[in-house]
Image (cartoon, grey):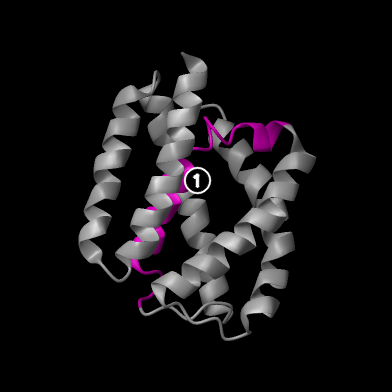
C-alpha cells in the first residue's frame, strides 16, 4: 500500500508541475492544483503534520525564488512571484515527506538529484512559462546547480521537522 502511495505522489508531482508551468499561459490549468492538493491532504495519514510541512517548504521555496528574482536570475512578470510559481512550490512541498523524503536521508543522492533536476526543471519551466533568464540559459543552469544541490536535501529535512 505504501509503494502505491509513493508512486501516486510521484505522479502527482509530475502532473502538478505541468499544470503549474502550462498554467502560466493557460490560467485555467492552475485550478487543478488546489484540487490536487486537497486530494493529497485528504489521503495523508497525518493531516496536521502534512499541512505544517507544506507551509514550511512552500514558504521557504517562495522565499528562495523571490531572492533569485530580485538578484536578476529570473525575470518574472509579477512580484514577488507569479501565482503559477508559488503554486508550484506547494506541489513540490507535497512530495517532500513522501516520494522525495529520501532526499533528506541520503544527502549525496538528494544533492545529486537537486544539482541536475532543479536546474533542468527551471530552464524547461522558464521556456514553457515565458520566464526571462537574463543571465542566459546555460549560466542560469550552472548557477542553480549548487543552489539546488543544497536546497533539495534541506527542503526534505525541513518537511520532516517535527511539528510543534
Residue 79 in percent (x, y) is at 38, 75
Residue 155 in percent (x, y) is at 59, 44
Instruction: Determine whether 105 is above or below 12 in the image.
Output: above
Which residue ends up furthest to the top in the rendered image? Answer: 1
Q: Residue at x 75, y 40 (%)?
A: 109
Disc 1 designates what residue? 57
Residue 27 in percent (x, y) is at 24, 65
Instruction: Determine whether 70 is above or below 32 in the image.
Output: below
- Residue 72 is at least partly visible in this image: yes
Task: Count residues near mark 1 (Cα–Cα under 10 Å), then give few for <14, some for 14-19, many for 20+.
Answer: many
Instruction: Determine whether 134 is above or below 6 in the image.
Output: below
Snapshot quadrant of residue 137:
bottom right
Does 99 appear in magenta?
Answer: yes
Does 56 appear in magenta?
Answer: no
Q: Residue at x 67, y 36 (%)?
A: 104
Task: Find numbered disc 1 in the image and state the secondary structure of the residue it sits on.
Answer: helix
Work out whether residue 68 or residue 34 is closer to the camera in this orientation and state it. 34
Q: Which residues are magenta?
A: 78-105
Amino acid at each position: 500500500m505504501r509503494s502505491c502511495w509513493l508512486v501516486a505522489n510521484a505522479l502527482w508531482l509530475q502532473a502538478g508541475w505541468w499544470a503549474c508551468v502550462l498554467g502560466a499561459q493557460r490560467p485555467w490549468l492552475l485550478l487543478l492544483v488546489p484540487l490536487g492538493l486537497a486530494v493529497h491532504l485528504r489521503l495523508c495519514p497525518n493531516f496536521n503534520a502534512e499541512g505544517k510541512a507544506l507551509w514550511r517548504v512552500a514558504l521557504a521555496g517562495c522565499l528562495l525564488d523571490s531572492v533569485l528574482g530580485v538578484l536578476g536570475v529570473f525575470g518574472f512578470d509579477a512580484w514577488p512571484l507569479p501565482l503559477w510559481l508559488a503554486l508550484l512550490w506547494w506541489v513540490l512541498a507535497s512530495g517532500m515527506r513522501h516520494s522525495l523524503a529520501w532526499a533528506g536521508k541520503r544527502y549525496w543522492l538528494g544533492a545529486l538529484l537537486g544539482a541536475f533536476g532543479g536546474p533542468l526543471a527551471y530552464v524547461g519551466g522558464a521556456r514553457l512559462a515565458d520566464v526571462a533568464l537574463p543571465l542566459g540559459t546555460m549560466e542560469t543552469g550552472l548557477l542553480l546547480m549548487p543552489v539546488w544541490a543544497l536546497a533539495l536535501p534541506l527542503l526534505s529535512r525541513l518537511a520532516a521537522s517535527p511539528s510543534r
